[in-house]
Amino acid sequence: MAAAISAAESGGSVIVLDKAPESSMGGNTRFSGGALRSPAEHVSADDLIREAQVLSHGRAIPKLVEILYRNAAADVEWLKGLGVQVGPAQAERPDLRGKIAWHIPGNGYGLVSSLYPKLREYGIDVRFEHKATKLLQDYFGKVVGVQAKTTRGFKEFHGNVVIATGNFQANAEMRTRYLGPTADSLIVRGSRYNTGDGLGMAAAVSAELMGNWGDFHSAVLDARSVPVECGETNINTYPYTVMVNINGERFLDEGAAFFDTTYVQYGKAVLRQPGGKAFCIFDAKMMEQDLVFGLCKDFEPIHAGTLSRLAEMLGINSKGLEATIAAFNAAVQPGEFDPERLDGKSTRGLSPDKSNWSLPIDTAPYFALPVTGGITFAFGGLRVDSKSRVIDTEDRVIPGLFAAGEILGGFFFQNYPGGASLVRSLVFGRIAGINAAQRKKREDRAA
Ligand SMILES: Cc1cc2nc3c(=O)[nH]c(=O)nc-3n(C[C@H](O)[C@H](O)[C@H](O)COP(=O)(O)OP(=O)(O)OC[C@H]3O[C@@H](n4cnc5c(N)ncnc54)[C@H](O)[C@@H]3O)c2cc1C
């Protein structure tokens, strides 16, 4: 949508093809939490650029990260100018702690439903149930359009092409091929329509596939989530709990940092536990402070008067849970608990220790949220340059072909900073749309 509106603002005549029916419009964006990572009062572009390198172990492409965060703040303003409501993250969603600056009320659905009418206002022709199947090229390799499968057969559309078809997370075969033998069973958090079509079409015209193809974005999800399009069932408040597996054993430092830089890796750590599950355990103190909650109010925590009864209800090792919690409580160090900052209230002598937000779990009733991982999108994708033009395997621009959003590679490796994907779709969508329209103008002048 950002690409289409930006192209129209630049004088382009735009057609949007979407494989989904209108009722399912909005791709993964529709299911998103609406959190935006962008420079703001408490965080500079330099901070975010540095952080991107730390979280990617130095592998994120510096030029792309620089473009992302140097443009993010202005592009969030552009969104606001279109009438999209954007507010300070924590004001509406207290779970969005860390460096997430902004949040869109109504989450991703709020964003999509604000932007969709704008497409119409800009005279953009939106065709649903039009699945792009093939890029059209001229004799010299320039991309001159796209073939689409419609309810009335195949059709061709001509012009410069921006591919923004998301990644391959909803394609079980590709998940297995790139992410491993058990990835077919992952919960798909977002759109069932993001099945890697754009990646395949681009690869067929020699686009370079780059980035972290063997890894993906996950989250700590309520294990009761539906298997496809579950949306925001993530539990971002796990840092204030103790997480155990079915043996009742801890396996990670729940409070290593605010959720926004750990949740993607922890979702995957949960998946590696026996049965691919774990449990966030907390007590009445936490519940009273309303500190631990699932975003999806369909799922209530499971509770019991004793830890052994709780273990029984969860179907996990009762002795293991009791021993873990007793050891945890004994290891909690003095200090003030403060969920708003890295409070340093840690445990000592455990393996692993908990670095922040450690409070003894000693006040009945005891609560648990069953959690698992899932896939949001995959990290590998297309290579683009600073104009969002797709680069081929011979290191050359593919004329007429642009790409934006989740389909891009080179940003995220193993880990991910929360709120970065929507901003990436916004920034590179705008760049792709503007450059595609400008290229068309140059072509028209030259003709
Ligand atoms: C539950 C959930 C929560 C999230 N929360 C956040 C968050 O808070 N902050 C954040 O930054 N990111 C978040 N994300 C990630 C983020 O929402 C997405 O990565 C981003 O919105 C992707 O945008 P996009 O435009 O690239 O793709 P999408 O929004 O997925 O759009 C892709 C479009 O391409 C269409 N399509 C696919 N194949 C074809 C084809 N062959 N022909 C025509 N059309 C096709 C699809 O139907 C869809 O409309 C979340 C994702 C999920 C699922």
Image (tube, rainbow, N blue to C red):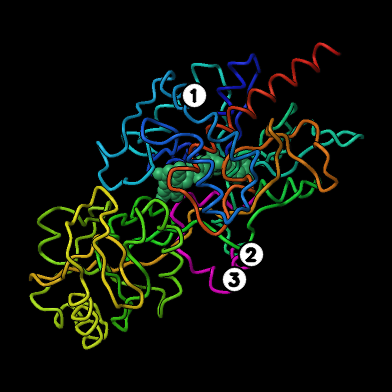
The answer as to whether callout 3 falls within 8 Å of ligand 1 is no
Q: Is residue 31 visible?
A: no
Could you classify mark 2 by the number of other residues whose Cα lies within 10 Å: few (under 14), some (14-19), or many (20 or more)? some
The answer as to whether callout 1 falls within 8 Å of ligand 1 is no
The residue lying at 66 percent from left, 17 percent from top is: 12
The x and y percentages for residue 384 are: 70, 39
Q: Amino acid at mark 1?
A: Ala
The x and y percentages for residue 273 are: 41, 77
In the foreground, 117 or 402? 402
Toward the top, the furthest residue is: 445
User: Can you tell which quarter of the image residue 11 is in?
Assistant: top right
**Residue under pointer 1:** 74
Q: Amino acid at mark 2?
A: Tyr
Q: Which mark is residue 178?
A: 2
* Circle 2 SS class: helix
In the foreground, 84 or 261? 261
Q: Amino acid at mark 3?
A: Gly
Q: Relative to residue 72, is residue 383 depicted above or below?
A: below
Q: Relative to residue 442, is residue 140 depicted above or below?
A: below
Give the label, 3 or 1, closer to the camera.
Answer: 1
User: Overall secondary structure of the magenta stretch?
Assistant: loop
In this picture, residue 170 sits left or right of residue 443 = left
Could you classify mark 3 by the number of other residues whose Cα lies within 10 Å: few (under 14), some (14-19), or many (20 or more)? few
Segment colored magenta: 175-196
The residue lying at 54 percent from left, 68 percent from top is: 184
Could you classify mark 1 by the number of other residues whose Cα lies within 10 Å: few (under 14), some (14-19), or many (20 or more)? some
The residue lying at 71 percent from left, 44 percent from top is: 383
- Quadrant placement of the C terminus: top right
Q: Which mark is residue 180?
A: 3
* Circle 3 SS class: loop
In this picture, residue 215 sits left or right of residue 382 = left
